[in-house]
């Protein structure tokens, strides 16, 4: 029952948090690769950091954006792990009815 509720909430929240998380990841990776691999200066790569750190939102809104971005990421991770059953106490039983036939190849 709780797994179904998590699945519904996960499905609702996923589209909302996707774009901010995606932009954060892409701009962070692009900044680092641009600086290290492509030799961009800080001034050339500054626009990537403006997007990555959400500086365009202003000093008043930026902390809330970062907080919500982090909460959204944690929510998606937790609900995803719960739905996966990774830490389930009762492991599902394996089907022992199927027979495996092994053949020995001749030389």
Image: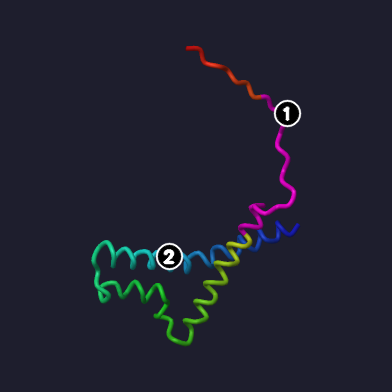
The dominant secondary structure in magenta is loop
Tag 1, which secondary structure?
loop
Q: Is residue 63 above or below residue 52?
A: below
Q: Residue at x 43, y 65 (%)?
A: 25
Q: Residue at x 50, y 77 (%)?
A: 65
Q: Quadrant of the N terminus?
A: bottom right
Mark 2 or 1: the one toward you: 1
Q: Which residues are magenta?
A: 80-99
* Sequence-earlier tag: 2 or 1: 2
Residue closest to the eye, 48 or 41: 41
Query: In the orientation shown, which residue stands out farthest toward the bottom?
Result: 60
Residue closest to the eye, 90 or 45: 90
Tag shown at residue 25? 2
Tag shown at residue 21? none
Q: Is residue 94 left or right of residue 67?
A: right
Residue ID for mark 1? 97
Residue 63 screen position, x and y as percent: 50, 82
Q: Where on the picture, by quarter, is residue 11?
A: bottom right
Residue 51 screen position, x and y as percent: 38, 74
């Amino acid at each position: 029952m709780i797994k179904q509720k998590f699945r519904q909430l996960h499905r609702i929240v996923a589209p909302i948090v996707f774009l901010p998380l995606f932009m954060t990841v892409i701009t962070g990776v692009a900044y680092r690769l641009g600086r290290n691999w492509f030799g961009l200066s800080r001034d050339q790569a500054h626009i990537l950091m403006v997007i990555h750190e959400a500086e365009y939102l202003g000093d008043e809104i930026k902390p809330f954006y970062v907080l919500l971005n982090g909460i959204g990421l944690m929510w998606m991770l937790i609900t995803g792990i719960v739905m996966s059953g990774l830490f389930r106490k009762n492991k599902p039983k394996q089907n022992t009815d199927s027979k495996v036939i092994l053949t020995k190849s001749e030389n």
